[in-house]
Amino acid sequence: MSFYSRHRHNIQLAAVLLTVLAAVSHRWLPLKTYEITGSKGHTQLNLYSGKGYEYGEEADWVDKDAMKMRCTITPASEKTACGLDIAFYEWPKWENGINLHNYDTVHLDIDYQGSASKIRFYARNFHPDYSNVGDFNSTKYNTINLRTRDLTQPVDVPLSALVVADWWLDQFDIPLAQSHLDFSNITGMGFDFGSPIPYGEHTIHFKKIVFKGHYISSASWYLIIMSIWMLTIVVKTVRRLIYLREKNRRYLQRVSMLEADKNQLQNKAAKFEELSTTDSLTGAYNRFGIDRIITNLFEQRALMLPLTIIIADIDHFKRINDTEGHAVGDKVLSKLGRTILANIRENDFLGRWGGEEFIIICTHTDAQHGFLLAEKLRLLIEGTQFELENSTNSPRLNQQLHPQLHPQLKVTASFGVGEVQAGETFTETFNRADSALYEAKKQGRNCTVLAQHTNV
Ligand SMILES: Nc1nc2c(ncn2[C@@H]2O[C@H](COP(=O)(O)OP(=O)(O)OP(=O)(O)O)[C@@H](O)[C@H]2O)c(=O)[nH]1
């Protein structure tokens, strides 16, 4: 028994618990972060005010390294913009940005001093489907307005909370299919106020801008868990199928072996049955075999009626033995038995009753037909040539070597025939047929006598 078989239930339980744990543990997996600092890669920090990206009068750095800026808005700078632009591209390939697609939130730690109620955050995405290489404005404008009073402490802004600005959708006539948020190629992002900006001084200290996301998205995480389960199930199923196929093959092998054994045993049993019930010399049933048949037949006699018994006895067989020897006698018995067997029906049974006496049980045969059969057999025996060659132990060997001095051996038999009468036992019928045989012998042998019915 394998380790798995012994601990299967525990292993399965552990696997389920592990799965549940894995499913809920996604939120505690280590996060990947991307922090915006002025010194990172190709990141450039630009202040802008007025209409362009030049340093305007309204925007200036308090401390560029610390990302602290200031906007000074006076009535003279009415309707002006003021903000920080963070660019990620390497000029002039400004269409190559950074992929923030797999980030979930942006962590903002911003210290704002001023009277504006909102600060706008935006992230611009370049995509050839909707952006033109020569037109920076055609990058998608993903944006959110943050209330300054929410920024008094660090906030995590879900990227899904941003929207694509209406004016951008309008201006570039964006179809529905391209109007969703897109962070796959952010070329720039920034903070400003939108307009109008309240008069006065606005200092914004960007202490931390960090994008956070899972290395593996929750969907991918669950997909991995499910895939592991699916793979396990497939592997287990395949292994089980292989095991079952092998088991089935072995089982079929065993069945065919048993089948072969069974056939062998059946053949042997049939052989033994035949040997135990057949007289090997004559091919007829031996006494045990014919007794069994008689018992069976008399138990279901009604089915076999009319039923006739014929007893055949070789004439002067003792003389044959004495003059020709036992070996010749055996040959005569053998040939006679096989001659009778070849000339009776399938539902007649020939048995060697003892010595040179045979019994034939004829089912569905009445006395008259039994008599005719006996006569037919008698004539056949009388007309059969019993060869004497090879009988080397014959006392008359010399005569065999000279056949012209010794004619072919003639064998005859006498027959007694008796039909089973209603209510009669086998012994009673047999005795009547035996008496008929005795009568045939008395009449000079080589003849058939039909037994008298008892009620005649
Ligand atoms: N060779 C041989 N002889 C057998 C066998 N069984 C019986 N005998 C002989 O068959 C002979 C039967 O002789 P009997 O009963 O006197 O009858 P019979 O000589 O045929 O004379 P009837 O029946 O009156 O014509 C005996 O000599 C037995 O030894 C056998 O299996 N082989």
Image (spheres, helix red, strand yellow):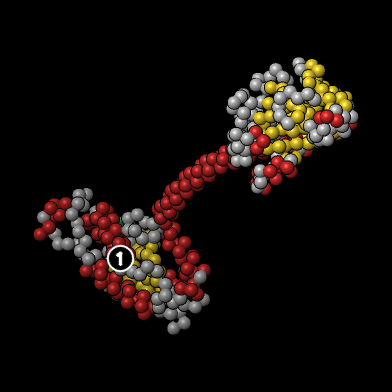
Residue with the most extreme front position? 76
Is 391 on the left-hand or right-hand side of 141?
A: left
- Vertical placement of residue 273 versus 436, above or below: above
Residue 112: x and y, percent? Answer: 86, 25
Is 102 on the left-hand or right-hand side of 403?
A: right
Residue 409: x and y, percent? Answer: 20, 62
Q: Circle 1 sits in a helix, a strand or a loop, which is it?
A: helix
In front here: 271 or 168? 168
Which of the 4 image quadrants contains residue 431?
A: bottom left
Q: Quadrant of ligand 1?
A: bottom left
Can residue 254 be spotted in the picture? no
Q: Residue at x 47, y 68 (%)?
A: 297
Q: Amino acid at mark 1?
A: Ala
Which of the 4 image quadrants contains residue 448?
A: bottom left
Residue 277: x and y, percent? Answer: 42, 56
Q: Is mark 1 within 8 Å of ligand 1?
A: no
In front here: 160 or 231? 160
Q: Residue at x 82, y 25 (%)?
A: 71
Q: Residue at x 32, y 55 (%)?
A: 281
Quarter holding the N terminus is top right
Q: To which residue does mark 1 refer? A: 342
Q: Residues within 10 Å of mark 1 (few under 14, many from 20)?
A: few
Is 89 on the left-hand or right-hand side of 166?
A: left
Residue with the most extreme bottom position? 456
In front here: 212 or 191? 191
Residue 107: x and y, percent? Answer: 79, 27
